[in-house]
Image: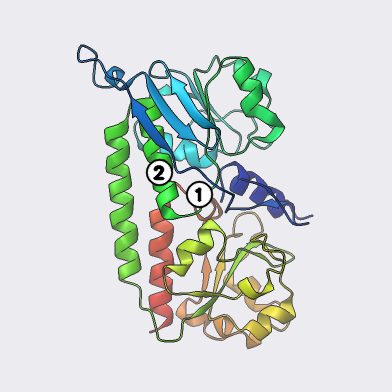
Amino acid sequence: MHSRLHSVARHVAVGVIAGSALLAAGCSSSKSAPAASGTASTSTSSSASPSAAAFPATVTAKNGAVKLAAQPKKIVSLSPSATEDLFAIGADSQVVAVDDQSNYPASAPKTALSGFKPDAEAIAKYNPDLVVVAADTSNIVEQLGKLNVPVLWFDAPNSLDDAYGQITALGAATGHADKAATEVAAMKQKITSAIAATKKPATPLKYYYEVGTPGNYSATSKTFIGSVFAQLGLANVADAADKTGGGYPQLSDEYLVTAAPDLVFLADTKCCQQTSAAVAARPGWSAVPAVKNAAKGTIVGLDDDIASRWGPRLADLVQQVSDAVNKAQG
């Protein structure tokens, strides 16, 4: 099994685009069921500081309503997406440890903690008063509950609104509701603008989104990332091949050549060193429209991490895809 597929399991299920085990590929679906977008309610005191006044608070995640008696001071994030969210909303000084896949921002306190195989004892050594996870592997939610550690389980969203909801919920959980609202508003503005500026021909351009190779593993419109691409007016060639409905089918070279995608998006440039030249050199691919028109930027290399998370940098990904779609149309 290629290491990329294990990376997808970590990034997608642990915070690149969590959820259930996927097919024989060993990936995790970026569309899990049903993902909680996150809600919060608070009880305030007029004599408290703005942040403290937001507590006690109740935040709803996939593991239900989680009560937080006071603003958390020691947060452990086992989700790369949540890590990016926490730093974006101003909760960085409260984060004492992040998992081994949380590589952004560079200032995040990266540790050997695993979100893929979490260890309650190892986590407890940081004395956290809040832990954020993207998957309940090893029954980590229950294990930490026995230690009286509040846990917020936010798995991969089903939609952009779900992604925004998670940021909002983290804002309420950390005492940064206002900054979270500002971040969400900025993301919405950027993404909405990029979608609106994307040329949408009468016949949608077809695309192939590669999450791992060798094996041509792809992501369909049922996944979170696929739902985002659909808003750009694109048709996903992987949809028809997903016989199990898992969201991540393996496509043969013959299938892809016949499907004739107009655009190829590579979400495996770091893990698998895929490039436009590498794609063009694949046997039989010279007949693929995206390869024929590669001079127009129809083979697009993406940042693996950004492409597999749903934090603030998602807006950058949407803009990159929009630009590629417009460039491909001349």
Q: Secondary structure at mark 2?
A: helix
Image coordinates for residue 119, horizontal then vertical, percent: 68, 25
Where disc 1 sits, the SS reads loop
Question: Which amino acid type is marked by label 2?
Answer: Gly
Q: Residue at x 56, y 16 (%)?
A: 126
* Residue type, label 1: Pro
In this view of the protein, which residue sits in the foreground, 133 or 257?
133
Residue at the spot x=30%, y=17% of the render? Answer: 52
Compared with 141, 225 (above or below) is below
* Label 2 Cα neighbours within 10 Å, binned few <14 / some 14-19 / many ≥20: many
Q: Quadrant of the C terminus?
A: bottom left
Instruction: Name the foreground residue: 135 vs 244.
Output: 244
Query: Which residue, as the protein is rendered here, is positioned at the far left?
Result: 46
Whether pointer 2 and pointer 1 mark residues with C-beta atoms closer than 8 Å, the reply is yes
- Color encoding of the figure: rainbow
Relative to 104, is 109 above or below?
A: above
Identify residue for label 2.
165
Q: Earlier in the sequence, mark 2 or mark 1?
A: 1
Towards the viewer: 305 or 43: 43
To which quarter of the image does residue 91 belong? top left
Instruction: Describe residue 178's horizontal placement relative to residue 147 as left or right.
Output: left
Looking at the image, residue 114 lies above or below residue 320: above
Q: Position of residue 45 (x, y in %)?
A: 25, 15
Picture quarter with the N terminus: bottom right
Q: Quadrant of residue 127?
A: top right
- Residue 276: x and y in percent read 58, 72
Is there any visible trace of residue 302 in the rendered image? no
Q: Which residue is mark 1?
A: 157
Could you tell me residue 302's position as x and y percent?
A: 52, 61
Q: Identify the residue shown where x is 55% and y is 18%.
A: 149
